[in-house]
């Protein structure tokens, strides 16, 4: 197993083997990550061109170039970190990156928003499952596991 695959697997939270049974695992989808990065670069490019146009700057071509360099540079820098942030659903909890633990009994709402999955608890906490390949099956699976 390659080092990058080991580190990705190690970053997935995993409950103790004698604890609740794991029902599902979700990792960010690489294609979805790059597709949304491209959309973000296009949007920022248009905003930058419009801003330069309003300022009567004659070098409008620099705006989309700068936007693409900035957005794709950021994406390349953060890719390994973002793509390692997986979620694990057990019979009782959703375990996310950075030690997030969301008891299924406390989940008030699960919905898809802009290609991500939003989990809202009864206490008002919001959690995001980022870059799923297809968010709707994730939403259905979590809703089916709710008590």
Image (cartoon, rainbow, N blue to C red):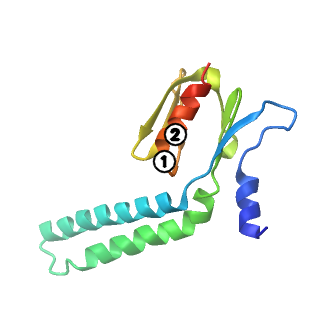
For residue 52, above or below residue 102: below
Q: Is residue 41 left or right of residue 47?
A: right
Residue picked out by circle 1: 134
Q: Position of residue 5 (x, y in %)?
A: 72, 64
Q: Is residue 108 left or right of residue 7?
A: left
Q: Is residue 64 left or right of residue 137?
A: left
Residue at 36% x, 60% y: name it: 40
For residue 112, above or below residue 108: below
Q: The N terminus is located in which quarter?
A: bottom right
Callout 2: 10 Å neighbours few (<14), some, many (20+)? few
- Can residue 129 be seen here? The reply is yes
Q: Position of residue 138 (x, y in %)?
A: 54, 39
Q: Position of residue 15 (x, y in %)?
A: 78, 38
Residue nearer the viewer, 26 or 108: 26
Q: Position of residue 12 (x, y in %)?
A: 71, 49
Q: Are marks 2 and 1 in contact (CB under 8 Å)?
A: yes
Q: The C terminus is located in which quarter?
A: top right
Residue picked out by circle 2: 137
Residue nearer the viewer, 86 or 77: 86
Residue at 47% x, 58% y: name it: 32
Residue at 72% x, 53% y: name it: 11
The image quarter containing residue 91 is top right
User: Which SS class for mark 1?
Assistant: loop
Callout 1: 10 Å neighbours few (<14), some, many (20+)? some
The image quarter containing residue 42 is bottom left
């Amino acid at each position: 197993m390659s080092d990058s695959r080991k580190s990705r697997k190690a970053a997935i939270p995993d409950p103790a083997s004698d604890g609740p049974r794991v029902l599902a695992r979700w990792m960010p989808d690489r294609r979805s990550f790059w597709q949304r990065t491209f959309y973000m670069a296009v949007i920022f490019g248009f905003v930058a061109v419009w801003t330069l146009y309003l300022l009567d700057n004659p070098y409008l071509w620099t705006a989309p170039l700068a936007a693409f360099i900035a957005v794709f540079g950021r994406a390349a820098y953060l890719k390994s970190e973002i793509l390692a942030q997986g979620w694990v659903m057990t019979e009782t909890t959703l375990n996310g990156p950075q030690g997030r633990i969301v008891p299924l009994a406390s989940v008030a709402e699960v919905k898809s928003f802009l290609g991500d999955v939003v989990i809202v608890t009864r206490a008002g906490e919001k959690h995001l499952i980022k870059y799923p390949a297809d968010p709707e099956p994730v939403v259905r699976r979590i809703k089916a596991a709710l008590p």
